[in-house]
Image: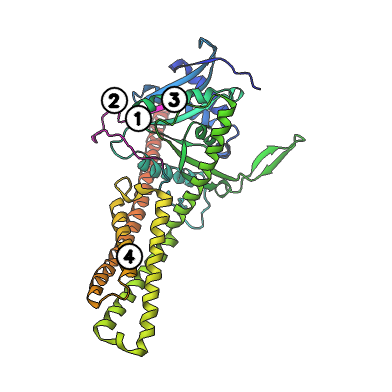
Amino acid sequence: MTTRTPFKIDFATTDDIDAIAKIAGDGFKTDTHTLMKDVWKGNDHHRDWVKEDVQDQLANPRIDVLVARKGADGSGEVIGSIYWARRCYPENEDDSAPTQRDTSKATVLPPHPPPVLPASPSSPLTVKELEETTGNAMNHYVSHLMPPGVKCRIIIGLCVAPEYQGQGVGSALMKWGTDKADEEGVYTWVSSSMDGHQAYAKAGYIEVGRLELRLDDYAQGVRRKVKNEDGEEVEQDWGVYIWRWMRRDPNYGTIPTSEAEVHTLASRTNEQSDIAKTRHEVGEAIESKRAHVVILVLTSLDILLVICQIAATLLGLDDSKEAEWILEIFAHTSLAIVTFFVLEVFLKVFAFGPRFFWRGTPHGLLHLADALIIIISFLLEIFLKGAEQELGSLLIIFRLWRVIKLTGTVAIETAEHTHVRVIELQMRVKELEQQLQESQQEVQRLRAHTADQV
């Protein structure tokens, strides 16, 4: 059994910056995403980035930077750190939206935007496209995890020195913030790395979204170099990397301390993870472009069948024995399509939860109206079967409402495409601004050099 090192949780100071950066650099030495970017940005690029970033975090009044110091009195070296951000808290709030408490539960979120492709079809995917794709996914999930005006806490970063992992350091750093969130009745969330999700799951975090990418697609033919058992350097694929967005609802309970509690919670967490993965896969399928095309085709076909049946009724063709079997086929086909749409509604409830049909998501009210129209149309199809002719007018009215389904699907598809395009343009603007700034600095440097020459 591992001997636990005594430590104390304390607020970080500027004197801890180097230690925090070193721990972050060492902690991600086995992270394939970081290692692949090292090839182009240098072996210590992550450590150097953290060193700059933590200075900004310490100066931000909305962020609590905490460290675990070795020793019962906290007089030893730093062995772990965490950044806890606060959102919509009165003491440092400057948002225009009013603060409100989110009483919903963690649920699978709509899928992220598609991966970013290179400007030219003949150009290979690079780290640039990888960063843009992960950035778009982050923006997407942040917009869902933090609706305007909603109060919550966020783990921006957590890292424990490799030699002190597995001793409760990370759990204690998390517990500092989750205890406060439980007292306040607010949820917390985190964007987890490939290896960090299990630690968050043990603390009560549930996966609500993910991004899976094959890193070799962005490596431009460069393979990972590792040493085998004989100490020889060999090459291998980078593999698939999974980013997970996870949420923890308040009043989950305390972080387990005994081995029995850890085992029980791990079993429950594995079951939740399997269900979350299934829900995520179902959600990806429902919201895919192919599914939208199928829905558009079926909706158009159903409208055509409705028009044919209405025309047959108005022209008196439904009394013809020759046309009777054709109209019967139309009726059964239309019912099958409506049944398919009802199944789609239930799958959306399973994948995204009831919140999908309310104001908690973009186009929520449109989804709700669409679901109600589908269910009412299905019930009318069933219960008005063979009813008196004058009741058929009610069925026709609700069947014509299916046009809203077609319009709504097109509107959602267009809005989502526009949203992705806006994000791409925003990323491009930032990139151009950075290039402009670098060019201006280069011009100033050249001017200074020319002045020295003169």
Q: Earlier in the sequence, mark 1 or mark 3?
A: 3
Crowd rating for badge 1 (residues with CA inside 10 Å; few <14, some 14–19, many 20+): some
Front label number (2 vs 3): 2
- The residue that disc 2 covers is 92
Which residue occupies the extreme right position in the image?
Answer: 230
Secondary structure beneath dot 3 equals: helix
Q: Mark 2 is on which residue type?
A: Asn
* The N terminus - image quarter: top right
Q: Earlier in the sequence, mark 2 or mark 4?
A: 2
- Tell me if I can see residue 240 in this picture: yes
Q: Mark 1 is on which residue type?
A: Gly
The image quarter in which residue 371 lies: bottom left
Residue 185's label in the rendered image is 1
Q: Earlier in the sequence, mark 3 or mark 4?
A: 3
**Magenta residue span:** 84-106
Q: Nearer the viewer, residue 55 or 160?
A: 160
- CA distance for labels 1 and 3: 28 Å
x and y percentages locating residue 177 in the rendered image? 42, 25
Residue 54's label in the rendered image is 3
Residue 379's label in the rendered image is 4
x and y percentages locating residue 167 in the rendered image? 58, 22
Q: Earlier in the sequence, mark 2 or mark 3?
A: 3
- Give left or right: position of 278 versus 366: right
Identify the residue at horizontal 58%, vertical 39% (top origin).
32
x and y percentages locating residue 404 in the rendered image? 28, 63
Residue 4 forms part of the magenta stretch: no
